[in-house]
Amino acid sequence: MIPEAIAALSEQISQYGNASSLHATGRAVRKKVEEARESIATCIGSDASEVIFTGSGTEANNLAIKGFYWKAVEEDLQRNVIVVAAFEHHAILEPIEWLEEHEGATVIYIPVAAHGIIELDALAEIIKTERDYIALICVMHSNNEIGTVQPVAEVVKLAGDIPVHTDAVQSFGKVPINFAALGVTSATISAHKIGGPLGVAALVLKRGVDITPVLHGGGQERDIRSGTINAPSIVAFAVAAQRAVANRELNYSRISGMRSLLAKKIIDAVPDARINGSNLEMLPGILNMTFPGTESDSLLLMLDNAGISTSTGSACSAGVQRPSHVLLALGMSEKDVRGSLRFSLGITTSEEEINSVGEVIADVVAKVRSAYLGATK
Amino acid sequence: MKVIAAMSGGVDSAVAAARAVEAGHEVIGVHLALSNNPQKYRSGARGCCTIEDSHDARRAADVIGIPFYIWDMAEEFHDGVVENFIEEYSNGRTPNPCLRCNEKIKFAAVLDRASALGYDAVATGHYAQLNESAIGRTMHRAVDPLKDQSYVLAVLNSKQIAGAMFPLGDTHKEDVRIEAKARGLYVANKPDSHDICFIPSGNNAGWLRDRLGSEVGPIVDEAGNKVGEHQGAYTYTIGQRRGLGLSVPTEGGTPRYVLKIEPKSNTVVVGSKEALAISTITGEDPIWCGHAPVKNTEHRGFAQIRAHGAALPCMYIATDSSITAKLDEPLLGLATGQGLVIYDGDRVVGSATVSATE
């Protein structure tokens, strides 16, 4: 968390009061929450009334997906098709797969080209044939594993009056994003990705659009999300959002410069390493690379031992690394996917850290290669 | 040394890892994921490799203060252990999968990866001892006779025992539990695992039936007369007496035992207890745990044919491709496919897979 957000959280956490209460302390807390809502709305380019606070990005995505789906089938049973990019985050794919298994949804996946951008022609074709049956289209604003920004505005144009939800958790505060200009029906943003607290996020939902709630209770957030409002975290979220947006351009150029330097250092040391995903528009802090003839869990272990934190695809509930569905969606072979690793850079990443990767990476890759060769002999 | 501690999530491997750290080694904890479809919880003393176990292993590593990783060995385990288990049964043999796992996974796939990554040894919570002497590194029984696991480790060759570390061999199990508690390892009271870890239901016969089918076949006596029917020959084991469901009793009402399993004709042969007696055991594909015996010469030693079975006094002869043990006293019933382990006192000489008995 950034210091300003910690300070805001600490101060607000001592202001005890329920923002939904009508008494003076309640009103005082409410005032802070509404100021925060307005400030976040300004940062994302929406109306304040369009910001619905939730407990996590996962919750906001579940709310959008299930909310739009249930609303659609309630109006017309035949509108049970969900169209989704094949390389979305699990917080999008899992609720959709759940609807497929339990609620009769039909899922159509939008293919992704090798460089990491969804195929708009394929989406146009899907919309052409299924238009009357589509409940919702989901396309993430930028991919969390490879960093490519997606042509969401184009998706909205193709969609016409079909609702479009975008998971903008990775993009918010990192690359330019404006809810109104983008034209999506809903977007998810989260505090913890921009130096705010854990456990608070928002679904930005167009005015006048009602979706079916997932949580039922006091209806605190626009009658769409129930649950006592987490005022201290919301206030800190707003502070973090303001800072992120204010510093965005500066951070972008700094972090993307570091990213280029890291990529260069790695390729200098390991010439056959490849970068996954490319677009003119990229998240600045993500570098995903394939090291042919390696296994990423061993790479992760060896780099971790050298004090360098990296990530692989994702782990199952037993903690076993699974080959990344994102890289598989790009058409990469399972072998190459298993040899891929993600480096994440942020505002605190230093040139010394980049240099230390450059110093150890050749030796790490050589050792992991010999382990891999031994195992596949 | 740089050491990889294989952590199952149980108390033994947790204490073993802690001891390796205390001995001054640079240790990282590794949990082996051996199943593609792990069970959520562990039921009693059965099975391992559940999601709960991987969490327990991680917690233990946190308490000890070492890095922790999970290695996916599900494919290697399936190919090297589970497939072998099914194949052996389909050939009418009774395999011991724990031996195969130590031979092919823990001290092969894991040790190989560890060495390639620059680690010197793999430490486990097995109960066995490693000694250094004039004849090199040797493996010996653990001091706790009830927990001694040297039998299932007898498949390790010289190179493998050179890369192995068994920090618990000199300790009794009850003391390991006390030590775990003192170290704040909350797995201190976790039950020991038994049985076959990849058959969590414990119903081995049912599990085999699902994979090998259940073709009904005859149960015959030694003279070839049909005395009953079975639901798949591989679910029987040599020496088995219960659950035969024979329809034709013997004249004197004496019990009958499984003498032989013939997978090709899908026949189970039963007979008297006396007919089970064997005094010579031959095993194939010998593995020497360090110092190998002089070949084609009789040696005095002990044969052990079950994980916690007795050490049977014997004379044994080793060749390049076999071990033959002549027992001082006959033994009742031994299935082929089991491990024959030879000891010289408490030292493990080597092992072979039982291929014939007489």
Image: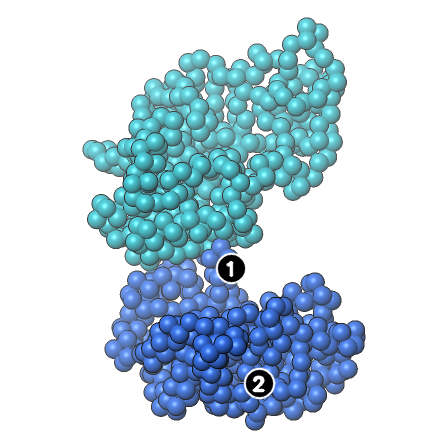
Chain colours: A blue, B cyan
The residue shown at (73%, 25%) is B229
* Residue B76 appears anywhere in the view: no
**Label 1: chain?**
A
SS label for mark 2: helix
Q: Which mark is residue A50?
A: 2
The residue shown at (44%, 45%) is B104
Q: Is residue A349 left or right of residue A334?
A: left
The residue shown at (50%, 62%) is A322
Direction top: furthest residue: B252
**Decide: marks 1, 2 in contact (CB < 8 A)?**
no
Residue B33: give x, y in percent of width and height: 47, 51
Q: Give residue B204's quadrant in the image.
A: top right
Label 1 belongs to which residue?
A316
Q: Is residue B25 left or right of residue A35?
A: left
The residue shown at (43%, 55%) is B71
- Image position of A10 with respect to A209: above or below: above
The amino acid type found where label 2 is placed reads: Glu
